[in-house]
Image (cartoon, rainbow, N blue to C red):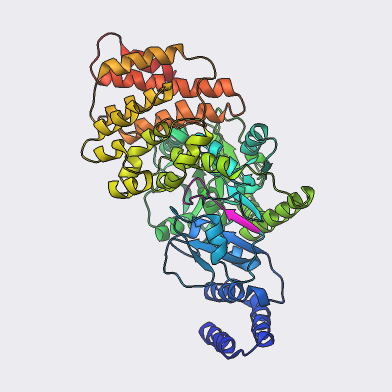
């Protein structure tokens, strides 16, 4: 029997020898004849996909065509997208400007638009969808999504980035929130937008294509495995610590009878080994639950998943909508962990049944292939229901909302991609250009030379101050704003403080203005700075304020402008109090006032 290498080389030779369209279709037929037997061979899938995309205009056997976002910008394919190659022809965006593979589209995230992307596609490759999974994470939204003749869809997964996601939602024809809980939130906020309620938001699925099960549960030597530490993380509240407390209490009482292992910061190989040797794996999800990668990893490895019942302000996480509690996984709290763990460990049949049922549900209903097929079917149904018409914002408005989303990502590599759209965004938002430029000065000058900025925006006085004197640059930009808004004053105050200017008069005036702000004064659709770093406060402190005070408040008030405004106002007031305390102002107990905003 020929090896995989020999078969692939033969197919390449057959392609090279093809002298006409009919011959190329014979190569296509050869690939498709082999496909059922080679669905799990990465080299075969990659080579077939490259061939089909290159000769898309000639392919006789129809398959869905997907234009894939930057989730594979640096590495292609990965475990998220390999299964997509089984059901669709995929052209994906690449950061490598010299990438010559037909199914990899070189993409400059600053200058290129969707029209540029379409212009680089091989002849005949007409996408059915643009699919941008994990759009708020590893991907970067291309400019110009209002132009393509096919539906654009984003997968949302980090819902604790609510301000970013709120603005990002405007860029796409449809969004896939992580779960039903968040789909309901976005449906109420965007009644005219397509919001697809699909498991995992199609951001991930079952990992069984690379995580095989270990031995039967009864044959495993580790009874309970814990793989995360108890460090506080804003999106997880105190639930990591609560799991550790329950784990330790159980170990103290039953450690002589059962083997409990706490292992974290493992290599992927070691991590998988522990999962495959464990009967029970413990899990915790954050406010962006109800599931995470660990849930899939544990179930795929054949362990029983025990997950703490985490309750957040976002409401019921509805894990029971995806897996049957007590039959496919176990949900516990601090009061019943011991009881539920013992019920499994003392009943091998129940242990095996729950492990098998959870694994089976995940690997069938929630396989990547099934989720991708469901996404394509949902898109097709939506397009038919709309009569082929897509309800989109005008290009200029879309540019503004995208710029806002990139700004609120607080990732310089994303923020810089809004550079060319700043003038348009300012015009659309009825603000002076300097109001939009002020909060961007730091992130742009950290990644782009002042000379390039000057080339883009002319001989702008504020830009000439960077990077030698950031404070003077901020002040020069602010002074050009004819009628500074409260947000302009906020941006100036926190940016100058971050750059070393500890002036308290400015902060005291800002505090009074914030207190007097009218209801609805603030909006998530504005350039208010949140990504600053104040010396003396660690990243966790900043992250906690952004998540708990700002993003959680915005997430639970989407669609309610007044509550949304109060969340932003509270975040600003908290930080002004913190900065005044940090600067040593003694006119009030600023730390106590800040603590009051934390509740």
Q: How many marks?
A: 0
**Foreground of the two, 339 or 80:** 80
Residue 135 is covered by the magenta coloring = yes
* Quarter where residue 213 is shown: bottom right
Question: Would residue 364 be visible to someone looking at this image?
Answer: no
Residue extent of the magenta highlight: 129-142
Of the 4 image quadrants, the one containing the N terminus is: bottom right
Residue reaching furthest to the top: 587
Q: Residue furthest front?
A: 459
Q: Which sits in the foreground, 125 or 40?
A: 125
Q: Is residue 333 left or right of residue 87?
A: left
Q: Quadrant of residue 514?
A: top left
Q: Relative to 317, is 145 above or below?
A: below
Residue 92: x percent and y percent?
53, 63
Q: Is residue 244 left or right of residue 87?
A: left
Task: Report if residue 189 is visible in the image.
Answer: yes
Q: Looking at the image, which is closer to me, 315 or 319?
A: 315
Residue 336 covered by magenta stretch:
no
Percent from the top left, x then y, of residue 177?
A: 60, 43
Q: Residue at x 59, y 89 (%)?
A: 14
Instruction: State the image coordinates of residue 239 (x, y, percent, origin top left).
Output: 47, 33
The quadrant the C terminus occupies is: top left
**Magenta span: helix, strand or loop, mainly?**
loop
Q: Which residue is nearer to you in this view: 349 or 94?
A: 94
Residue reaching furthest left? Answer: 468
Residue 470 in the image: x percent, y percent? Answer: 25, 35
């Amino acid at each position: 029997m020929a090896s995989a290498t020999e078969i692939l080389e033969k197919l390449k030779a057959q392609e090279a020898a093809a002298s006409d369209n009919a011959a190329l279709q014979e190569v296509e037929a050869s690939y498709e004849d082999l496909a059922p037997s080679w669905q799990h061979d990465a080299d075969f899938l990659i080579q077939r996909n490259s061939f089909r995309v290159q000769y898309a205009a000639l392919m006789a056997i129809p398959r869905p065509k997907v234009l894939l976002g930057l989730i594979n910008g640096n590495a292609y394919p990965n475990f998220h997208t390999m299964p997509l190659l089984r059901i669709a022809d995929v052209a994906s965006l690449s950061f490598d400007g010299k990438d010559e593979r037909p199914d990899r589209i070189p993409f400059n995230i600053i200058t290129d638009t969707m029209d540029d992307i379409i212009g680089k596609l091989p002849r005949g490759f007409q996408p059915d969808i643009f699919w941008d999974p994990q759009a708020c994470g590893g991907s970067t939204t291309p400019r110009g999504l209002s132009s393509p003749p096919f539906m654009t869809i984003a997968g949302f997964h980090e819902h604790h980035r609510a301000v970013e996601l709120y603005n990002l939602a405007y860029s796409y024809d449809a969004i896939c929130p992580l779960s039903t809980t968040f789909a309901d939130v976005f449906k109420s906020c965007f009644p005219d937008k397509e919001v697809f309620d699909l498991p995992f938001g199609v951001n991930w699925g079952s990992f069984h294509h690379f995580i095989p099960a270990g031995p039967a549960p009864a044959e495993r030597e580790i009874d309970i495995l814990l793989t995360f530490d108890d460090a506080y993380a804003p999106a997880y509240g105190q639930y990591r610590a609560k799991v550790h407390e329950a784990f330790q209490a159980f170990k103290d009482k039953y450690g002589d009878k059962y083997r409990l292992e706490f292992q974290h910061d493992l290599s992927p190989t070691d991590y998988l080994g522990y999962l495959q040797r464990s009967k029970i794996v413990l899990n915790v999800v954050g406010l962006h639950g109800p599931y995470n990668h660990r849930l899939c990893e544990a179930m795929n490895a054949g362990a029983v998943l025990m997950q703490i019942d985490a309750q957040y302000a976002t409401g019921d996480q509805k894990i029971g909508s995806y897996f049957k509690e007590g039959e496919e996984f176990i949900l516990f709290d601090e009061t019943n962990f011991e009881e539920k763990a013992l019920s499994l460990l003392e009943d091998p049949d129940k242990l095996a049944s729950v492990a098998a049922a959870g694994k089976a549900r995940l690997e069938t209903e929630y396989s990547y292939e099934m989720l991708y097929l469901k996404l394509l079917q949902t898109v097709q149904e939506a397009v038919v229901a709309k009569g082929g018409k897509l309800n989109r914002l005008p290009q200029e408005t879309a540019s503004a909302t995208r710029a806002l989303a990139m700004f609120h990502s607080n990732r310089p590599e994303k923020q810089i991609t809004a550079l060319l759209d700043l003038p348009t965004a300012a015009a659309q938002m009825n603000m002076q250009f300097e109001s939009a430029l002020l909060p961007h000065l730091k992130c742009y000058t950290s990644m782009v030379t002042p000379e390039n900025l000057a080339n883009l925006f002319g001989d702008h006085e504020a830009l000439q101050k960077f990077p030698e004197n950031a404070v003077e640059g901020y002040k020069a930009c602010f002074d050009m704003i004819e009628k500074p808004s409260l947000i302009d004053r906020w941006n100036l105050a926190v940016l100058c403080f971050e750059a070393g200017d500890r002036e308290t008069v400015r902060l005291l005036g800002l505090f009074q203005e914030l207190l007097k702000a009218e209801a609805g004064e603030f909006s998530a659709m504005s350039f208010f700075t949140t990504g600053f770093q104040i010396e003396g406060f660690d990243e966790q402190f900043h992250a906690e304020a952004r998540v708990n005070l700002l993003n959680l408040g915005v997430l639970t008030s989407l669609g309610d402008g007044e509550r949304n405004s109060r969340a932003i106002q509270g975040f600003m007031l908290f930080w002004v109090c913190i900065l005044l305390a940090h600067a040593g102002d003694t006119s009030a107990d600023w730390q106590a006032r800040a603590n009051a905003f934390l509740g």
